[in-house]
Image (cartoon, grey):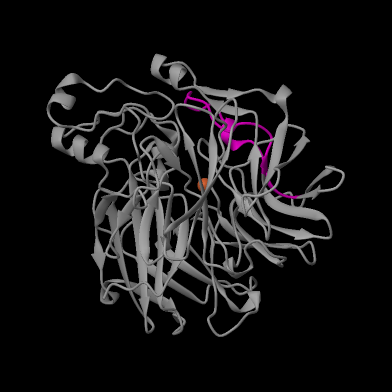
Amino acid sequence: MDLSAYPYLQGNYAPVADESDFSEGQLTIEGKIPQKLQGAFMRDGANVAYQPNHYVYPLDGDGMVHAVYFKDGHVQYKNRWVETNHLKTERQFDRAIYGSVGKLLPVPQEVIDGGGEPSPIRNTANTNIIYHGEKLFAMWEGGFPHLLNNDLSTVGLYDYDGALQAGDALTAHPKVCPDTGQLVSCTQRWDNGNYCVQVFDAKGKHLKAIPIEFDRKGIIHDLQITKNYVIIFYAPAFHSLEKAMKGEDPFLWEPELGTKIIAIPRDGSGKNIVFETDPFFSWHFCNGFEQGGKIIIDYIWISSIPFSTAQGSGVEKQPRRMYRMSLDIGTKKVTNEQFSDIFCEFSRVDERRMGKDYRYGFAASSNRDWGDAHGYNCTGRYDFQTGETKLWEFGADANAGEPVYVANPDSEREEDGWVMCFVYTPDEGAFLSVLCAGDFDNGPVAKVKIPTRVPNGFHANWMQGLTLS
Ligand SMILES: [Fe+2]
């Protein structure tokens, strides 16, 4: 492959060619693995298998999952592509066939005649990996999730026993309610503007659909839960399939419309509350909760839509900041303030506090300027009690991924858990960093060094109790 034309396929954004299995003897452990950790750290991301037809951002690449399994103080590593129908078709023809979300290509007749995947919209399965109801899913927001086995082999597309209809696109960012174990998710569709909150019970059985009609399908990537509400941002950011099919830039930003914040009652009763404010865009919430007639939302703010179809436009590198928003339910007043001036993304919390008052947010953070492709060289801790932001820097040239909070099963204190992410540095190579959440002064308590590269990717999670056998 010649990937030289693509900024987001350079350096640690470049794909790896192999699927690997490393036992503990092939990994190098620095520090001490906490014995209490029983489960797996997994991260999804883009890893192109063939020379792409069009590639601007990692959202265009084939999904690959990297996993470190923990059991009784021992570790193993695996990585596997998600075997989507699109990837299997490209393997059958031994070349790239499909375009990207930004530039759809017609599927050649010979591919359709040969039994290949007929949809031009590639389900990349590259965005998130979750474990809910004892099932493991690779997620992508434009279609169905893919069910995986614990060893990362692919079972196939999953429709939640018929709850998802043809054309439903399930978000890659569901939230798990820590009180009920419910998965609060949503579907959108390519063929109309309708948005639908979807609630599944702790075992993954579909419980409820709460529909909302929008005139236009917005780019709504994440959702947040509080005790009584599902919160979404409806930014003036839209995607036009017609433009994508014609090869025109399909990403639309219409700031005159402002951004709406919509609070949807979780029980499906009562009216949605709509708040209106100045235009902004956001990929990710950090957390949210209700307090004295207000809804408090912490999230990553971006001034406008952060992508186009053009290579090297730089729009994706505009400032991203941790913000705290306050929504007054009675007056509909919106207060929106920057919490920290650190460039950050991929915000996470102790999931036991999802939707509740809490102290710490964690985010991939940066204290340096980047060149053609941006990244993050630190894990940041955002203390909403003191207002302090603390960074652990892995080195000026490091690439640090989404930091996942892993609870200490013996403690309720946020400070007693761990924060894990994949890191790559030119000197150390790839490793899984295990930081103590309460100690950002002394660096990782353990590093699991992996004898291959782990490319930069998207979302990760801790799969409590998931083991290989
Ligand atoms: Fe995301």
Pick out the residue farthest to the left. 114
Q: Answer left or right for 237 relative to 372.
A: right
> Where's residue 74, x and y in %?
35, 80
Numbered disc total: 0
Q: Write the residue at 60% across / 83% down.
A: 411
Pick out the residue farthest to the right. 331
> Where's residue 208, x and y in %?
51, 52
Q: Write the residue at 40% across / 32% down.
A: 6
Quick one: quadrant of the C terminus? bottom left
Q: Is residue 457 magenta?
A: no
Residue 50 quadrant: top left
> Where's residue 209, x and y in %?
52, 47
- Is residue 454 something that shows in the picture? no
Q: Write the residue at 46% across / 83% down.
A: 36
Reply above or below: 48 against 411: above
Pick out the residue farthest to the front. 269
- Is residue 356 something that shows in the picture? yes
Q: Write the residue at 59% across / 30% down.
A: 315
Quick one: quadrant of the N terminus? top left
Reply above or below: 166 against 336: above
Reply above or below: 442 against 296: below
Q: Which residues are magenta?
A: 301-324
